[in-house]
């Protein structure tokens, strides 16, 4: 369900409008009869685990220590 309110009413009753949005309602804010904004709840995105399976490769030595000179450079010693 969508509700339309004017800018003045939206400013005056923002907390109430946000409660309605949290309950799943959509609120349009109008200025002189023209919709200027729409309040909607956050989108709920479900994780898509494994979507890139087969496209990512990790080297066998990924966890190995870095060469000493490179490690010193990362630590700002060089």
Image (cartoon, helix red, strand yellow):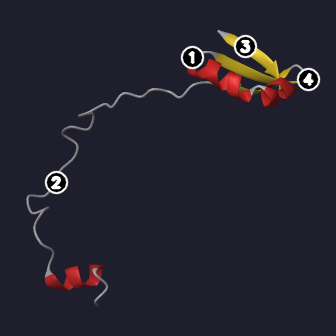
Tell me the residue that label 2 is attached to: 58
Instruction: Report how far apart the C-alphas of labels 1 and 4 lie in the structure.
Output: 27 Å
Q: Which of marks 1 and 2 is in front?
A: 1
Residue 59 picture quarter: bottom left
In x, y percent, where is residue 14? 73, 28
Check residue 23 in the rendering and tell me which mark sits there, or answer none. 1
N-terminal-most mark, 1 or 3: 3
Look at the numbered disc 1 and give the secondary structure of its residue: loop
Tell me the residue that label 3 is attached to: 3
For residue 67, side relative to residue 16 (left or right): left
**Residue situated furthest top in the rendering:** 1
Whether label 1 touches label 3, CB < 8 Å: no
Check residue 73 in the rendering and tell me which mark sits there, or answer none. none
In x, y percent, where is residue 39? 67, 26
Instruction: Report how far apart the C-alphas of labels 3 and 2 lie in the structure.
Output: 51 Å
For residue 39, side relative to residue 44 (left or right): right
Check residue 32 in the rendering and tell me which mark sits there, or answer none. 4
N-terminal-most mark, 1 or 4: 1
Q: Neighbour class for label 4 at 10 Å: few (<14), some, many (≥20)? A: few
Look at the numbered disc 2 and give the secondary structure of its residue: loop
Q: Compared to 17, does 69 lie above or below? A: below
Q: Nearer the viewer, mark 1 or mark 4?
A: 1
């Amino acid at each position: 369900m969508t509700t339309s309110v004017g800018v003045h009413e939206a400013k005056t009753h923002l907390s109430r409008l946000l409660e309605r949005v949290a309950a799943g309602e959509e609120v349009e804010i109008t200025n002189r009869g023209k919709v200027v904004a729409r309040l909607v709840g956050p989108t709920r995105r479900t994780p898509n685990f494994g979507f890139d399976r087969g496209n990512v490769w990790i080297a066998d030595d990924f966890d190995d220590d870095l060469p000493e000179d490179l490690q010193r450079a990362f630590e700002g010693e060089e």
